[in-house]
Structure formats: C-alpha cells, structure tokens
Amino acid sequence: MAATPTVIFGAFDRHNFGDLLIAQVVARMLPRHELLFAGLAARDPHGDGGPPAVTLARIAAFAHGRAVNVIHAGGELLTCNAWEAAVMLAPPQRVPALIAAEGEWLRDGRAWAQKHVGVTSLAPYALSKTALPGVRVKRLSFNAVGGVDLDTHDAQMGADVLAALRSADWVSVRDCRTQALLAERGVEARLIPDPAAMTAVLFGTTIRRHAANLALHGVRRAFPQGYAAVQFSADFGDDATLDMLAAQLERVAHTRGLGIVLFRAGAAPWHDDLAVYERLATRLRADQVRVFASLNIWDICALIAGSRIYCGSSLHGRIVAMAYALPRINISHPDHSFERSKHAAYVRTWEAAGLVGIVHPGNLADAVAGELATDRETLRETALALARRYRMEFGTLSAA
C-alpha cells in the first residue's frame, strides 16, 4: 500500500540555518514518502541548500482529495507569534513598516495574522488539524519542537498552541523545560533530541564534498593550525559588545594559535548581519580573521565540522558541533539572561555534566581554553547517543 502523502511544515520559509537543516533531516528520514515542504510563505532556496516550500494554501492541490500527514519539522515553533513571523518573513524593505504596525497586531491579533501570514492563529507555526481548509489531515505530528518561554506569552496565544498540540497524534519536544511546561498544561510529550543531531550521520558525504569548495580551501590555507567557527546575531552589533568580543577573540587567536572565521547562521531579519561581522573583523588583525560569506547550509556545516571549536549564539550551530563531537560554546548577549533560554534548556537536557553551556562575551577566551581541553571521547559518546536516540524516537513516528 502506498504511503500517505506527507507535508513537512516549519519555519524554513526564511533563511535560518537551523530551520533549513532540520527540514532536510526530516525529509531524509522519510525516503519513501511523497513529500511536500510548506511554510507560511513560498520559498525558493536560491542555492542555499534549503528545500523549496509552498504556502499553506497550496497543500490542498498537493493532497488532491487524499488524506495527508503533517509533520512539524522542529525548532522553537511554539513561541513564535504571528507578528514576529511576519517580520522575519518580510523582504528587508517591508520590515520597518511591519515593525511600525505592531500596534495593529496588538489591537486585533487574529485579523492581523490572517492578513499577513494566512492563518488566524496567534501561533502560526503550530498548526492544528483544522487549520488547513479543504485538507483532511490523517495524522498530525510535532517533531522535537521547543517552547521554553511559553509561560511568558499572551494567554490567547498559549491557548492556540495548546489547542494545536491537543489535536495532534504525536508530540515530541527537544528539551526538558518545554516538556515540563506542556505537562503542567495536560499535554504529554516525548523527549527527543533536535533533528540536527543527525547531521553527520545522514549528510556526512554531502558535507565532505562541500568542504572541498574554494571558500573552505581558502580558510584551511589561511589557518593551517585550525580555526574557531564564530557566529552571533545582529543584536551583538553595538560598539561596546564588538569591542568585548574582539578583545576575547584576540586572546583566543594569540594564546591558542587559532584563526577566527565569522559566519552567518541566518540572514532573515533579526538574525545575523554581514556588516556587523565586517565591523568586528576590522577590530582584529587581518591575518587573524576571515569573514565567511556563504549562506549555503552545507557550506556552513562543513565550516563547523572542520573547525577546532564552535562559538556562537545559534543553538543549531552548537547542535551541529555536537553531531561532529567538537567543543562548543554558546555566547549570550550581555543584556540578556540566558538561564531560561532555549540554549540553556538544551544544554541541561542533553550535554554531559561539566561542559560549558553559555557564556558572557567577556568570558569567552577562558571558556574556549577550557572546552578545547575536553575529553574527546566524551564528546563522541554524546554525538553517538543523541543520533541513536533521535533515530529510535523518529522511528516510532514514521512507523505510525
């Protein structure tokens, strides 16, 4: 009997490294299924390695009267509201107008969401079984989703999230905090690593091929003793924070003999900004730093896999480094508390005791020195255990 057609849904309708990567993981784990990628906006991957995606309105044509399965691919989907989604999906020239329209969103969120992202839910990346008019959903699944600060969001938005989860046939989350928050609200969720834990297992050949690209070859030639793969979001771009990062990275380059390679883990609004990296690069000696321009997810994976250590604000940067058994450090913005962040929740759930989780930028050099001394066998055991756990848990979903 033919497999039920499957819609893979998520936030890979914008350029975010992690969302694009986990969409490809889920698709690779469902090799015999007729698949469609869908988001809130149509997407042409433009050579960045992500999947093409259609809008929700196109799912009915794909179904063609048949029942479909819908899988939420993963990521921090439960706490993204419709206004945030619209801003992140917008072309740069529309972003200021959407930000200015926040008052309209606050006055009538459902009408605003319908107008700008095509659904009435205040949490548009959490689909319920009734969210797709004219489409019969056979099985609805949430795969390794996150929602670490769900309890801080508007009550109506939280109700939309819970309604979607309660309509689902299979719910899994990627951290213990989200699992506990849902349990308090009567939703039982399985605990499963993020899909990116499968990166090295599923895409090792692809990533090795991209490691031979000219850009990566130039990095290795510039830094024969190795390099740190460094990333941070645009909100680190004030002069004081950049000065702090530059001083710490200078210490890393000087004391550890490592080059500094700055890369973007997302180009959508509120993600990473190439201009900010270039401003940081001017604060370091030219022979210490390179700005890696590629946004192709396999180039980024190859850059991380070939590094000595990953340092950045991206959780998925960390998870890819985990998959390759590499030292990893997340950096927290000086003005933000990281104790209740998705990074802290993931570290507490899956990392071995004693490993550095998240550091203030002013402590980065000392943290790098400590992480480079980590026992590599411990890192390998973690990588293998998480890949096994994800494969086993996803097997439960795909079998159903």
Image (cartoon, rainbow, N blue to C red):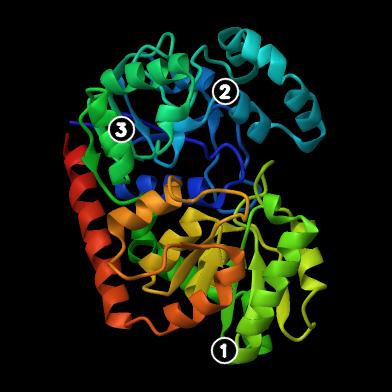
How many marks on residues?
3
Nearer the camera: disc 2 or disc 1: 1
Determine the secondary structure under disc 3.
Answer: helix
- Image spot of residue 379 (x, y percent): 32, 74
SS of the residue under disc 1: helix
Which residue shows up at 60% across the image and 20% down it?
117
Query: Residue 158 location in percent, x, y?
Result: 41, 20
Rounded to the nearest angstrom, the CA distance separating label 1 from label 3 is 41 Å
Q: Is residue 85 above or below residue 279?
A: above
In the image, residue 319 above or below residue 99: below
Give the quarter of the figure containing the N terminus. top left
* Amino acid type, mark 3: Leu
Mark 1, residue position: 256
Q: Look at the image and tell me whether residue 154 can be seen.
A: yes
Which percent across, then down, holds residue 53?
54, 35
Residue nearest the viewer, comparing 86 with 371 = 371
Q: Quadrant of residue 282?
A: bottom right
* Quadrant hosting residue 8: top left
Find disc 3 in the rendering and name its residue: 181
Query: Pointer 2: what residue?
Result: 82
Given the image, on which type of amino acid does mark 1 rest?
Arg
Q: Secondary structure at mark 2?
A: helix
Q: Earlier in the sequence, mark 2 or mark 1?
A: 2
The residue that appears at 54% across and 29% down in the rendered structure is: 54
Inspect the image, locate mark 2, and give the three-letter code of the amino acid beneath it: Ala
